[in-house]
Image (cartoon, coloured by chain):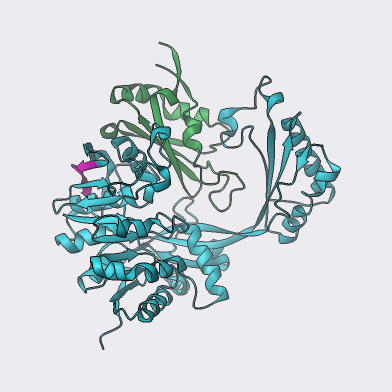
Chain colours: A cyan, B green
Amino acid sequence: MIRIANGQGFWGDSLQAPVEQIRRGPIDYLTLDYLAEVTMSILQKQRARDPKAGYARDFVELIARVLPDLKDRRIRVIANAGGINPMGCRDAVLEAAARQNIKVKVATVTGDDITDRLDQFLKRGIELKNMDTGEPLSAIQAQVERANVYFGAFPVAEALSQGAEIVITGRVADAALTLAPMIHEFGWKETDWDKLSAGVIAGHAIECGAQVTGGNCQVDWETIPDLADIGYPIVEAEPDGTFCVTKHAGTGGRVTVASVKEQLLYEIGDPTQYITPDCVADFTTVHLDQAGPDRVRFTGIRGRPATNYYKVSASFTAGYKAMGSLVYSWPDAYRKARAADQILRRRLGLLGLRFDAIRTEFLGANACHSIPAGEPSHEIEPHLPEVVLRVGVRSENRAAVERFTREIAPLVLNGPPGVSGLGLGRPRVDEIVAFWPALIPKTEVRPEVAIWPSES
Amino acid sequence: MAKRKLVELAHARSGDKGDLVNIGLIAKKPEDYPILVREVTAERVKQHFEGVCKGAVERFELPNLGALNFLLHEALDGGGTVALKADPQGKTYSTALLRMEIDA
C-alpha cells in the first residue's frame, strides 16, 4: 500500500495544508495541483514582465520550508507548479536546496507548450478546432497567447523511476499527479485500463484538496467538525486498483460516502466516458463503502482504452471587462439599487458608449440564483436591510470600459440615497483571456523527462 | 404525493467547463434515487433554469452513486473569465437546482 496526499487544490489554496500533510502523519507522495486554465494566463502575464517568472512561486517557498522534512520522511513531491516555465521553477527549487546545503534530485516534465508550433500545425492541416463550437483555431490565431497540451501520468512515472524526489511538470492532466506514483510503484502497464481508470478516479477524488474531506460539502455542513483545521485528502492505494480516501487522524473535516460522492460528480461530463490522456474511466462502475471513520473504500472501477488524442488548451485575448458595485440600505434598498441601475444605463447611453455585454445583478436579492429564485417577494423586498448593485460591462474597446469605471462613484452623490461605495474605489479594467479547447493527435507531441542536476 | 423541495431529498455540487455547467445531484437516501430519476428530468431542469441556460440540458444516470449528472450548455454568459456574473463558475447552480419543487 502507498499513501498519496494532496496538499493543494488550486493556486491560492491554503499555504499551510501541504505542511500539515507532511508533518501530521505518514505519507509517501505529496501531490500539489496549482494549475487552472485561468492560472496559466496569469503566469503568462507574469512571464511577459519577467522572463524568469511564469511558475507557481508559492511552490518554491513551500519546498524551502519543508525540504528537511521531505528528506527525513522520504516523501516525494509531484507538482504541476512549473506552469509555463518549468525550467525556471526547477532553477528556483535547486537554488533553495543549495542555500540549505541539501542535495535533491529534481525532475522536469515538459514538451506540453506548443505555442511556437501552432503555425506549423495549422499549415499542415491540423486545425485545432474548438471542441465546443467546431471553429478552427485560425479564426482567432492573431489573439492567441499560448497553447499547452495535457500530458498523462506515464512521463511523471518515468521521472519517478529515474529517482526524482521532486517532479515539476508543466501542463499534465490533474489526476495524472496521483496516478503516476501508482504506475511507478505497482508497475502498471499502458494497457491496464481498469487499474489506470482507478488511479484517475483516485486523482479526481483528491485533486480539489479539501473539497472531498468536508470542505464545500452540503450534507450536514454545520456538523462537520473543525473546518478551521480541516485535513486534506490522502489516497491509500493498493496494487490491484482498489483504494481508500482518508485524511490524517486528529484533523478536522469529514470523509464519508456522501462527501466523496459530491467530489466525484464535480466537473465531470458523461460519467461513462471520463476521457484522460491515459484511459477512459467509467464513473458508473465505482462502488463506495464506508470502511471506517473518515475512510471510504473504492472498488470495482472499470475503464477503457485511451483515445489517440491529447487535449489542448489555448488562451486568447478577448477584449476588456470591469465590474462596479454600490450598496444600498433600507428603506427601499432593492428599489433604490434598481433605480440606480437605470440611471447608470441611461448615462452610459447618453455618453454614446457601446458594450458587447452589460449585466446587472442585485446581491442580497437574487444574484446567485437569479431566475430560479425569482424577484424578491412583496413581503420580503421592503424589509431587505441592504442590497448590493453590481454592474459589469464587456467590450473590445478598452476606452469604453475605462469610461464606465468613472460612472459608478458619482452615483453616491448624484443618485438614490442611503448608499455606500463599499470602500472599493474605482473599478479595475481587466483584459479578458478566454480559452479554446481542442484535440491534437498524440503522435504530434512528445513529453520530455529530465533529471537535474544532470549527471553529465 | 406532496410537493417537496429537492433540498429535502438531495444534495448537489456544481462546476464549470467553458460555458457549460455541470450539476451533480445526489439522493441523501438511496431509496429516494428513483424519485429523482422520475421527477428531475432534463426537460424540468431546462425549464427551471429558463433564461439562464440558453442551450440544451443533458442528463446522465449514476445508479451506483444514487446520483444524476446534468450538463447545462451555454449557461454561463460565455464562461469563466468572460462572464460578468458574480458567480462566473456556476458554483451556486447546485443550490439553485435544490430549490426545485417535485412530487414526492
Question: What main secondary structure does the magenta stretch of the protein show?
Answer: strand
In this rendered view, identify the residue nearer to me: A436 or A179: A179
From where the camera sits, is residue A268 visible?
no
Residue at 57% x, 65% y is: A143
Determine whether, in the image, residue A28 is placed left or right of residue A124.
left
State the count of labels.
0
User: In the depicted view, which residue is nearer to us: A192 or A335?
Assistant: A335
Segment colored magenta: A296-304
Q: Residue A241, image x and y in percent?
A: 17, 50
Asked whether residue A303 is drawn in magenta, I would say yes
Relative vertical location of residue B28 with respect to residue A36 in this rendering, above or below: above
Nearer to the camera, A97 or B90: A97
Residue drawn at point x = 32 percent, y = 35 percent:
A258
- The image quadrant that residue A456 belongs to is bottom left
Residue A378 on the magenta span: no
Quarter placement of the N terminus of chain A: bottom left
Residue A426: horizontal and vertical position, in percent? 73, 55
Does the image show residue A9? yes
